[in-house]
Image (spheres, rainbow, N blue to C red):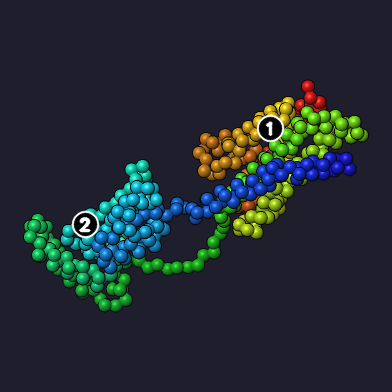
Amino acid sequence: MNAILALAIKDLRLLFRDKVGFFFTFFFPLLYAVFFGAIFSGQGGGASAMKIVVVDEDSTEGSKAFIRELNESAELDVDIKNRDEATNLVRRGKRVGYVVLPQGFGKARGRVFGGDRVKIETGIDPGRSAEAGMLQGVLTKYMYQGIQDAFANPDKMRKQINESLAEVQSSEDMDPTAKATLQWFLPMMDRFLGELPKNEQSNRGWQNFDLESKDVAVQRGGPQNSYEISFPQGIIWGVMGCAAAFGISLVVERTKGTLVRLRIAPIGRMHILAGKAFACLLTTMAIPIALLLLGIIAFGIRPDSWVLLSAGIISISLCFVGIMMMLSVLGRTEQSAGGIGWAVLLVMALIGGGMVPLFIMPAWMQTVSHVSPVKWSILVMEGAIWRNFSVAEMVLPCGILIGVGLVCFIIGTKAFRWTEG
């Protein structure tokens, strides 16, 4: 045991002396986790607000109120510019589009019956047709919200009816049939609203329901923030880098004759491999612990279960110790072993959710991801952090990881060459 510990300490010292390797083992995963966590955190759990420009050519209380409603909405982020500035911002890709509120907009929005229609102009980059449809939908929503507000207020509604009736009576180019119909209907509507009882019921206008608000304790489901998604991915990149580094170090020691010199000492072959595996195990366990502690302190990560998280970290470490041993027999030289090893690891990461979160992948790719230990590694991390896995649900992914590690380690030790050639 003393020999194994001494060999493990030797490998750890070599790792810490290699500043580039140490950076990519510990700090690159942290940068990855923070970078992608910051990107996804801007979404707030949904789509970001569309940035648009509004040109207010009406400059009335009605148009200004409409702009305030748009700016307070979750869908839009609004700036107010003149027409030339708005066009230039859209042309340069600085804004999704612009909206022009013409003269008479404020009056037309509050009008329910009769009157001339106003034309709202929008300008969108032709390459952003999806945003154009979304913008039209949002504008329609808030345009009709003004009409809804009018119907909900009988006094406001009567005022609009009288204004509309005056416009109908003064109109000279309206269709006679439509004009006669409105001259009959609008006074009837005004009379009906005027005869409503002046009590609490009438103050509710056309609303035929009541809203009752109750406080409900929120049960957490899903990640609390974007860093709980990005940190498991970053951790796996660190573990993969560690496995690659130790696998390549075995090839270097073989090609440079270090293993031959070690065998001259009273140390068995299995002691040498066990020392390398133990050093790799300690490092692959230290990476998740260090990154998670930083995530908890600085980024609000709150694991659901510390016990299951510990079991998951141990399972991941055992798996990648075995993979490390397998990588050490893939090439005869340091260059070939490094190239082939990282190619294998990148494929594992690509199909296993190390580059794109698993829940974003299409169904067929999620099925293919079952063959990648990266998929199961991320799953056990997420299961303990935010998926709220039970012990029974953690058994399968942890068991798969331990099994993969055991098989890879056995194959690697059987195929390992102690001398070059």
Task: Say few, some or many: other residues with alpha carbon within 10 Å of mark 1 (under 14 / 14 to 19 / 20 or more).
Answer: many
Tell me where residue 13 appears, x and y as whole percent. 79, 44
Task: Give the mark nearest the N terminus, 2 or 1.
Answer: 2
Q: Nearer the viewer, residue 400 or 202?
A: 400
Residue at the (85%, 36%) spot, across then down: 271
Residue at the (37%, 59%) spot, across then down: 79
> Which kind of residue does numbered mark 1 sit on?
Gly
Q: Is residue 421 left or right of residue 97?
A: right
Q: Nearer the viewer, residue 209 or 163?
A: 163
Instruction: Give the tally of numbered discs.
Output: 2
The image's mark for residue 118 is: 2
Q: Is residue 206 left or right of residue 337?
A: left
- The C terminus - image quarter: top right
Q: Secondary structure at mark 2?
A: loop
Q: Quadrant of residue 86?
A: bottom left
Tell me where residue 263 appears, x and y as whole percent. 88, 31
Q: Is residue 10 left or right of residue 129?
A: right
> Which kind of residue does numbered mark 2 sit on?
Val
Q: Secondary structure at mark 1?
A: helix
Q: Which residue is mark 1?
A: 338
Task: Say few, some or many: other residues with alpha carbon within 10 Å of mark 2 (under 14 / 14 to 19 / 20 or more).
Answer: some
Q: Is residue 269 left or right of residue 160?
A: right
**In the rendered image, the vertical position of residue 11 relative to residue 103, given as above or below:** above
